[in-house]
Amino acid sequence: MADITITLPDGSAREVPAGTTVGGLAAAIARGLAKKAVIGSVNGIERDLVWELADGDEVAIITADSERGLFTIRHSTTHVMAQAVLDLFPGATFAIGPPVENGFYYDFELPPGADGRPGTFVPEDLERIEARMREILAESQPFIRDELTSERAREVFADHRFKLEIIDGEADDPTSATESGLVRTYENPPATPSADPPFHGYPGFIDLCRGPHVPSTKAFLGHFKLMRIAGAYWRGDEKNPMLQRIYGTAWATKADLDAHLLQLEEAAKRDHRRLAQDLDLLSFPEELGGGLAVWHPKGGIIRKLMEDYSRSRHAKGGYEFVYTPNIANGKLFEASGHLGFYEDGMYPPMEMDNGTYYPKPMNCPGHNLIFGARQRSYRELPLRLFELGTVYRYERSGTLHGLMRIRGFTQDDSHIYCTPAQAHDEIRGLLNFVLSVLRAFGFEDFEANLSTRPAKAETVGTDEGWAEATDNLRAALEAEGLAYEVDEGGGAFYGPKIDVKVKDAIGRTWQLSTIQYDFNMATRMGLEYVGEDGARHTPIMLHRALFGSIERFFGVLLEHYAGAFPTWLAPVQVRVLPVRDDHDAYAREVVDELQAVGLRVDWVDASEKLGNRIRKAKGEKVPYVLVVGDDDVAARTVGVNPRGGEVDRGVPLDAFAQRVADEVDDQQHVS
RNA sequence: GCCCAAGUAGCUCAGUCGGCAGAGCAUCUCACUCGUAAUGAGAAGGUCAAGGGUUCGAUUCCCUUCUUGGGCUCCA
């Protein structure tokens, strides 16, 4: 057989016999590679291992440990799950099932139950489905690619209405494309043909799919777990039927699967709702209504410290402090445009004698009133107005989530009015300021999104204005050396924006800060300044929230620190424990001395054993536990038991006080 | 808002195939006075989310509502 020439990713050429497959090539290169090969990329298109190569192909072998390999594993696993569900639930049909981050899902519609409504899964079904999946894996069914005419495909999938919609091109499924009248499918023939297969002309399972897939159900697929059942609308549209979605997670190795499950456990332990309860920080009383929180003293002190810190940084950063009321006449929100666009997201109106009032969903209209309260000169710009402004938004009940999605919250909100010429430097300074403040809260790893102009018709402003604004934002990102992704068309109708995301202690990312460029509202609300030329100009308006919402930021911090707030934020920084009652007097002296240097200190008397008092203090995540006994009274020392460190006895009290005061000072001056 | 699940003491949970409601922790009282992650005894604490229905009898079964959780959708 004649040889063909293949080009590998490093640019080297390789001669292989004609008829060599992707898998064959991998084997020819190295046995180890063949073992890990999941699929290949042929001339930029991903192909199965059985794909036959042609002369001149550029080929890369994709392995199980790569992102694309893992994607394929998850994709193949979701086919196996669909087969299992169709086996176990006769009459069930299925919609789409893509791989997603960490796993996969598939959407199903189950036959109607006795009440005529579509059936639903129960949690125990997951075990049955998983067991059936393991059987399918053991059968080592091949994944067989085929292309059918759409007529033939319609016959095969005649009993599956969602598949018919996909064949007809009415639905958009990234993983099962139709093209030039041909429908791509993947079949998994069973070891023993089904007595009553759910597809016409096939003994077992077949699905619409672009592929590629692992070679067989036995290869690479064992390390999965079905996670949960959820409702999901067909094609994500709430007007469509609600389907039953099963989510699973799948990995290349058992170690990876275990690590992921462990990470989930770790995340659950850090859940801010649980920590808020355990540490007595805040609560969501039912009597108060959904999505509303009350802050208990310990959460309150942390919040106050965060707010104090924010205020002091803003004061130094050239911001001016303003206050605006929590309700406002609807006319204001008509002028700002919020009532037109976002009324559904606002709390309902209150009718009053001189108008209709709404709880404010945003602070900007109020700040604009301050800007517009008198004639402004270019000499005053940039004008930076800052407010810890509490807003109310009517979030749909099903979307509420602890502090992360809440109906009443306080934004650390700022609106900056500047001239177009100032915008560049202002944004750059702003981004630097934002990152500096976030660092003080222990975040080191940042990413950003630059969201650009949406479809032109839906936006306001000129092409030049958008281009300049976007360039200003991009220049700021680059000047700060901040990694960013461009979210094309992700901007608001009034301008582009930067969103800053942080990575927390266990690697999750949270979107926090936002810097938005606004061409619209200043014009809408008639804001003007007198320029150097004596003429009136419309200012550029920058919306900026740093924490975003204090509540949400607090929730993120709580999860980031797993409840162990750094000393400068800890509700109780030091707890003093006298060994016996006769050390009480000295313990009080210790408390007084530490309080005198500004520390938050309490003490617990000896009515319980020392060990238990220490245990409780550790549970409360107090940074420093001090034990004082006979030796300490005699020598004016303390026994220091720091959070996460070793016990150090006989530390002079003055030295300890100085050390902790310095630590707190340092933590607050990170920049 | 929609789908599914769940609401039992302050917290974490068990339990009742329909017959006087249980534990641990927390709280309070008493005793113990102890040097680095749980001292002992006792007490108190509940309209079993709310309302309705079935029943001799409902915390338990059914219906409705509310709340919470996981998703979908949404997030100016």
Image: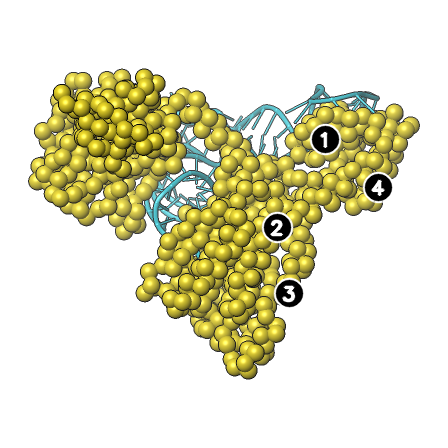
Determine if residue A253 is in view. yes
Whichever of labels 2 and 4 marks the residue nearer the N terminus, that label is: 2
* Residue A195 drawn at (x, y percent): 13, 22
Q: Which residue, given by chain and number where applicable, does mark 2 sit on?
A: A437
Q: Alpha carbon of mark 4 to alpha carbon of mark 3: how far?
A: 37 Å
Quickly name the residue at label 1: A642
**Residue A542 at x, y percent in the picture:** 52, 63
Per the rendering, the colour in which chain B appears is cyan
- On the image, the x and y values in percent for residue A30 come to 32, 19
As helix, strand or loop, the secondary structure at mark 2 comes to helix
Labels 1 and 3: the sequence-earlier one: 3
Q: Are the residues at dot 4 and dot 1 in contact (C-beta closer than 8 Å)?
A: no
Near mark 4 (Cα within 10 A), the count class, few <14, some 14-19 or many ≥20, is some
Question: Chain under label 3?
Answer: A
Q: Amino acid at mark 4?
A: Asp
Secondary structure category for the residue under label 4: helix
Name the quarter where the N terminus of chain A is drawn. Answer: top left
Q: Chain of mark 1?
A: A
Q: In this view of the protein, which residue sits in the foreground, A317 or B16? A: A317
Disc nearest the viewer among 2 and 4: 2
Q: CA distance from mark 4 to mark 1?
A: 20 Å
According to the picture, the residue beneath numbered tag 4 turns out to be A592
Q: Which residue is mark 3?
A: A320
Q: Chain of mark 4?
A: A
- Mark 2 belongs to chain: A
- 2 and 1 marks on the same chain: yes
Shade of chain A as shown in the rendered figure: yellow
For badge 2, the amino acid type reads: Val
Q: Which of the two labelled residues, at mark 2 and mark 1, occupies the earlier sequence position? A: 2
